Image: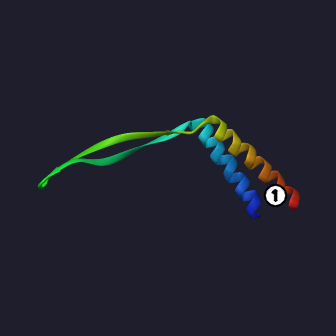
Amino acid sequence: MNAAKITGIVLVVIGLAGFFTGGFSFTKDTTAAKIGPIELTVKEKESVNIPQWLSLGAVALGAIVLVAGFRKS
C-alpha cells in the first residue's frame, strides 16, 4: 500500500467517525483558589462539536485521494 491509499482510508474513517459521533467531550481540571496548603480544584466538562459539513468533506476528500491512489498503481 502506498501513502495515498493509506491517507485516503484514514480520511474516510475519520470523516465517518466525526459524522456519526457529532463531536467529543473531555474533563478539564482547573485550580479555582489556592490559600496556603489548601487548594480548590474544579472539574469542568468541555465538549467539542464537529460540523457535519467538515465530516462529509473529509469523507469526500478521502475518497478522491483513495481513487487517485488506485489509478497511480
Percent coordinates x, y for residue 6 in the rendering: 71, 58
Q: Quadrant of the N terminus?
A: bottom right
User: According to the image, what is the colour scheme of the structure?
Assistant: rainbow
Q: Residue 42 vs residue 18: left or right?
A: left
Q: Which residue occupies 56% across, 37% down?
A: 21
Residue lying furthest bottom: 2
Q: Quadrant of the C terminus?
A: bottom right
Q: Residue 20 vs residue 46: left or right?
A: right
The amino acid type, in three-letter code, at marker 1 is: Gly
Q: Which residue occupies 71% across, 57% down?
A: 7
Examine the image and state in which quarter residue 59 appears.
top right
Q: Which residue occupies 67% across, 53% down?
A: 10
**Residue 57 vertical placement versus 65 (above, below):** above
From the image, tell me which residue sits under label 1.
69
**Res 68 seen here:** yes
Q: Residue 42 vs residue 55: left or right?
A: left
Residue lying furthest left: 36
Q: Which residue occupies 36% across, 47% down?
A: 28
Percent coordinates x, y for residue 20 in the rendering: 60, 36
**Res 39 seen here:** no
Q: Residue 24 vs residue 14: left or right?
A: left
Few, some or many C-alpha atoms within 10 Å of disc 1 (few <14, some 14-19, many ≥20)?
Answer: some
Percent coordinates x, y for residue 69 in the rendering: 81, 57
**Residue 45 vertical placement versus 30 (above, below):** above
Percent coordinates x, y for residue 68 in the rendering: 83, 55
Mark 1: which secondary structure?
helix
